[in-house]
Amino acid sequence: MAGSREIVVVVSELLGTNFWKVARRRLPQNQHQKNYGYTDYENRTIVVHHRLQGVDLFRTLIHEAVHAACRDLNEDAVCRIEDSVTNACWPLLDEIHAAIKDESDDC
Ligand SMILES: [Zn+2]
């Protein structure tokens, strides 16, 4: 499975690095609420908690990317898209990553 740094790079490439940035920062966590990420529209930055790994990181990046792309979408719809994209893409992530790397190697 691709490492978490690679996942961030893949999502950055899908979003377009000139359009939205992805930043990993320490976000406050407590027993009652997990703070995995947020979308900073003003600075066009998707921020994800620095400790997220694997499928949690992937889900959060997809979730925030949907918020970034469709600001008016309600939270239920964003969560449904997050679930659908994660279920469809997570098992293929290594293959997707390899295809993106092959494309960039051709340039
Ligand atoms: Zn949300």
Image (tube, grey):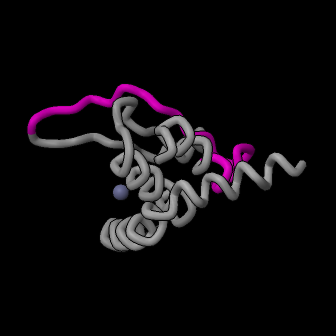
Q: Residue at x 53, y 45 (%)?
A: 7
x and y, in percent, of residue 22 in the image: 56, 40
Left or right: where 54 falls relative to 62: left
Residue 104 higher or lower than 31, as above or below: below
Q: Nearer the viewer, residue 39 or 54?
A: 54
- Displayed-image quarter of ligand 1: bottom left
Q: Residue at x 43, y 63 (%)?
A: 91
Residue 92 higher or lower than 18, as above or below: below
x and y, in percent, of residue 90 in the image: 44, 61
x and y, in percent, of residue 34 in the image: 22, 42
- The span picked out in magenta is 12-31
Q: Is residue 65 visible?
A: yes
Magenta-span inclusion, residue 77 = no
Q: Residue at x 61, y 40 (%)?
A: 21
Residue 34 higher or lower than 80, as above or below: above
Left or right: where 32 falls relative to 8: left
Q: Residue at x 30, y 71 (%)?
A: 76
